Image: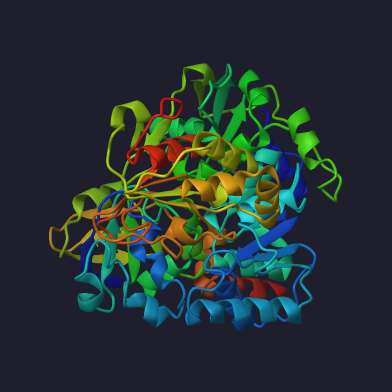
Amino acid sequence: MIKGKVWKYGDHIDTDVIIPARYLNAPDPAELAKHCMEDIDLSFAGNVQQGDIMVGGWNFGCGSSREHAPVAIQASGISCVIAASFARIFYRNSINIGFPILECPEAAAAISAGDIVSVDTKTGVITDETTGETFKAAAFPAFIEKIIESGGLLPYLREKKG
Amino acid sequence: MGMTMTQKILAAHAGLEEVRAGDLIEAKLDIVLGNDVTTPVAIGVFEKAGFTEVFDREKIVITLDHYTPCKDIKSAELCVTARNFAHKHGITHLYDVGNVGIEHALLPEQGLVGPGDCIIGADSHTCTYGALGAFSTGVGSTDMAAGMASGLNWFKVPSAVRVELKGKLRPFVSGKDVILHLIGEIGVDGALYKSLEFTGEGVAELSMDDRFTIANMAIEAGGKNGIFPVDEETREYIKDRFGREPVVYSADDDAVYEKTVTINLDELEPTVSMPHLPSNTKTVKEVAGLHIDQVVIGSCTNGRMSDLRAAASIMEGKKVADNVRCIVIPATQQIYLDCLKEGIIETFINAGCAVSAPTCGPCLGGHMGVMAAGERAVATTNRNFVGRMGHTESEVILASPATAAASAIAGCVAVPGQE
């Protein structure tokens, strides 16, 4: 079970604002985390707490294929991202690195910045503890569930290969 | 129930008779691509997981094109990592400074990709090769690592949006105007998770360069891939280039599409995307006169021969306005050489343009044309997000090569053909 304070952003949050290209020359996760979201929210990197939750609108993570984007969010301490929808490469990348993301338009619309939210990634149940509202995100297909459980695509492939 | 062109290619690479939208499949890969930004991350993932061998050293392509010639020590170190890995594994297709070009212009030019292929690339604009009738999609570094290790990757079979092209483009209107117009119509997530399948009599009127530009920006509509049917134009292009036997797929007559969007090519006008989303489109006429500081002509979207010819024909005998810095970047060494032979480079330099070796540089605010706060560019690139070409208070207007060249001469956003 994940529980944390919400950082809320809008629609079409692109990978250029999640981690600007000027920092891609240093792909170390801790280094990327220092600059995460800085082009739209200078307060994020310095104040995010381990376990906090990011909530976005439609088409979250659109733009470039840079895996540095979910890596930066994960390394900043964020425990999961909830959005109305995800851009497809960001979605793949998050699953492939074993980072939980949940697609739930109702939760994305209702949850406010600063709310305390808990998430059960197994069932997809999202609870806004500040307002008492609950939501249900679609569950992952079994195959994707296995990748996340293995800690990412490569560990999954190693396990499969035996 | 029939299959789309994309679904047929995926079914064939998964060894299945039939696939349907939503199926999760594992498909064989013909080419796995990465660049200097994404490959080092993939190498880290590959090695951390304990893999020691690549699946096929001839099917991996590494292009050091984003921050090269290296802009700083950190980017030089990324290239060292990629270069060492390529040498260690005997990877045949490593493209380094001196022979590298911008990946999505380079791979088709070198005949590394062709009809019927299933391709992944750790770069979002890998969807470009759909112009050749391939399934080709952008992925992240972990997918690249998995592809390098196993030659396989997982895909969710996409549904499709059919784009029916009718008529013929008018002078000074090109493939870039077509794709910007389409993104304006359907939105930046209008094709999310889907294929954009281009069909109709209008396809035959589009050059290969126009098709590359259109397929290239499928991702800007959220698309998984963009794809064109294979015709005489395609066959002419791959002749003497593509080393493998092309496999030509076409959509079934009863293929299912989520929707059809019709574009009358002869009604299109020069189009731009205003800051800060590619879907924020206007006709050039609507925003003409807007002050600009920089023009960039190049990138994986518009750095090909016909793009540079279109720009040069407008700049011939003219001068770039005093308030504008115009940067021209041929996308590959071969294009650069062809431009030299045709006198196009001379035209650009006489006009007062800076001409550079192939690099993605300014498109992503990497180097070779980063902007300060308050500056505005007209660029033939593909994204105009906040901070994309530099400071968060700089702005990028996406445009065709003809519009960019006309704007460079005018010193403001200008309609090509009226300068």
B177 and B345: which is toward the camera: B345
Image vertical order of residue B206 relative to residue A9, above or below = above
In this picture, residue A51 sits left or right of residue B133: left
On-image quarter of the C terminus of chain A: bottom right
* Residue located at (55% from left, 27% from top): B163
Colouring style: rainbow
* Residue located at (76% from left, 38% from top): B237
Task: Give the percent coordinates (x, y) of residue B165.
Answer: 57, 22
Image vertical order of residue B71 relative to residue B118, above or below = below
Task: Give the percent coordinates (x, y) of residue B220.
Answer: 46, 44
* Residue located at (46% from left, 31% from top): B182
Image vertical order of residue B153 relative to residue A159, above or below = above
On-image quarter of the N terminus of chain A: bottom left
Q: Please identify the quarter of the rendering in which residue B21 is found.
A: top right
In this picture, residue B331 sits left or right of residue B114: left
In this picture, residue B394 sits left or right of residue B268: left
Task: Give the percent coordinates (x, y) of residue B262.
Answer: 51, 21
Q: Is residue B183 visible?
A: yes
Image vertical order of residue B277 relative to residue B50, above or below = above
In this picture, residue B10 sits left or right of residue B382: right
Q: Is residue B25 visible?
A: no
Q: Please identify the quarter of the rendering in which residue A55 is found.
A: bottom left
**Which residue of the protein is positioned furthest toward the left in this rendering?**
A131
